[in-house]
Image (cartoon, rainbow, N blue to C red):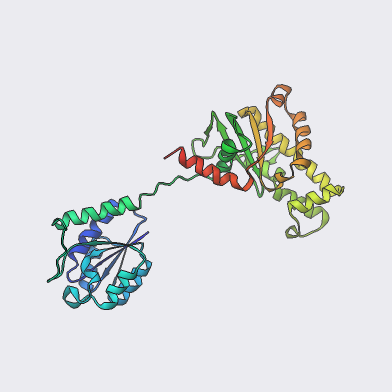
Amino acid sequence: MIIAVIDGMGGGIGAQIVSSLREELPTYVEIYAVGTNSIATSSMMKAHANKGATGENAIVVSAKKANIIVAPISVIIPNSMMGEVTCNISEAIADSEALKILLPIMPENVELVGLEGKPLALLVKDSVNLIKKEFNIKCEVENDVNCAGLGEMWLGAGRGATSSICLTIGTGIGGCIIINNKLINGFSNSAGEVGYMNVNGSSFQELASTSSLIKKVAKIKNLNENDLNGKIIFDLAKNNDEDCLKELDNMIKSLAVGIANICYVINPEVVILGGGIMAQEKFLKPKIDKALKEVLIERVYKNTNIEFAKRQNDAGMLGALYNFLNKI
């Protein structure tokens, strides 16, 4: 966010505004000190504005960039401030799409009817409070896989389950852990990073991700990896291509071992499989089920539901909304 503070003459009003804004607003908010003369700009810079510039063109350019303009009302009255405010300056500020917060400090021979005569300090305080109120937008941050898992729990394949694991199979393998309807982030926000889990001497994602599948098929067939994708490999497998069938079987066995390890630790009610290739549910589900039956003990196998993501590309957006609504 950019706030342009515009002032002229000695810059005293602008300096008070900049000082108050700097004290009250987070550091990522940029404050531009833009003076009609160098003395005004210097005064505002001493109050700790981020950047400063002087003159008509600087004001015209800054008015276009700013999200908010704060200034004495004189800046939209041509020839005010002893002639420092030009027609171009007042026009640029008036035409700017920025929110304009103008302090009612009148030039000579101008009166505004009906205004309460507040001292400058209170006018500056009111201006700062207005900015804080106008832009107090609440925000929550969460990673994409966790959002996808929350979306599926809320309105997808995990709906009604109190505990679930969501795995996204793609370039790597991401995981989301939900227990008692609560997202588990872990001590350092690293819970669910199952792609790095050791499976048979390699990382889980080196054996069971879409990118690893593509890499292995490309090597066997002496093809460029860029000429393959998951859909092509599945289409070839459905037409009984031996290389693709073999590598898909290897991938599914590794996927089953990884899922089994997670189930033994978390014991979720449902495991949700997402990511691009999981659109191949009809082809994959019986094979994954068979592989899991071989690596899970009977009690765990019978009490763990394997589901394919239902919300697909919408899951992340829905989960982000769910996360936001439950934290504000």
Residue 88: quadrant of the picture: bottom left
Q: From this view, report whether residue 201 is shown above or below residue 123.
A: above
Q: Position of residue 248 (x, y in %)?
A: 78, 44
Look at 64% across and 40% down and name the residue there.
167
Q: Nearer the viewer, residue 213 or 76?
A: 76
Q: Is residue 278 visible?
A: yes
Where, quadrant-wise, is the N terminus in this rendering? Answer: bottom left
Q: Position of residue 269 (x, y in %)?
A: 63, 28
Q: Is residue 144 visible?
A: no
Q: Position of residue 259 (x, y in %)?
A: 68, 34
Where, quadrant-wise, is the C terminus in this rendering? Answer: top left
Residue 156: quadrant of the picture: top right
Look at 33% across and 73% down and name the residue there.
60
Q: Position of residue 306 (x, y in %)?
A: 69, 33
Q: Nearer the viewer, residue 5 or 110?
A: 110
Instruction: Please state if 125 lies on the left or on the right of 214 as rendered.
Output: left
Q: Residue furthest top?
A: 299
Q: From this view, report whether residue 256 is shown above or below residue 75.
A: above
Instruction: Please state if 295 lies on the left or on the right of 270 as rendered.
Output: right
Instruction: Please state if 237 lies on the left or on the right of 280 as rendered.
Output: right
Q: Nearer the viewer, residue 254 or 282?
A: 282
Q: Residue furthest front?
A: 113
Number of dots carrying numbers: 0
Instruction: Please state if 135 lies on the left or on the right of 23 as rendered.
Output: right
Q: From this view, report whether residue 205 is shown above or below residue 289.
A: below
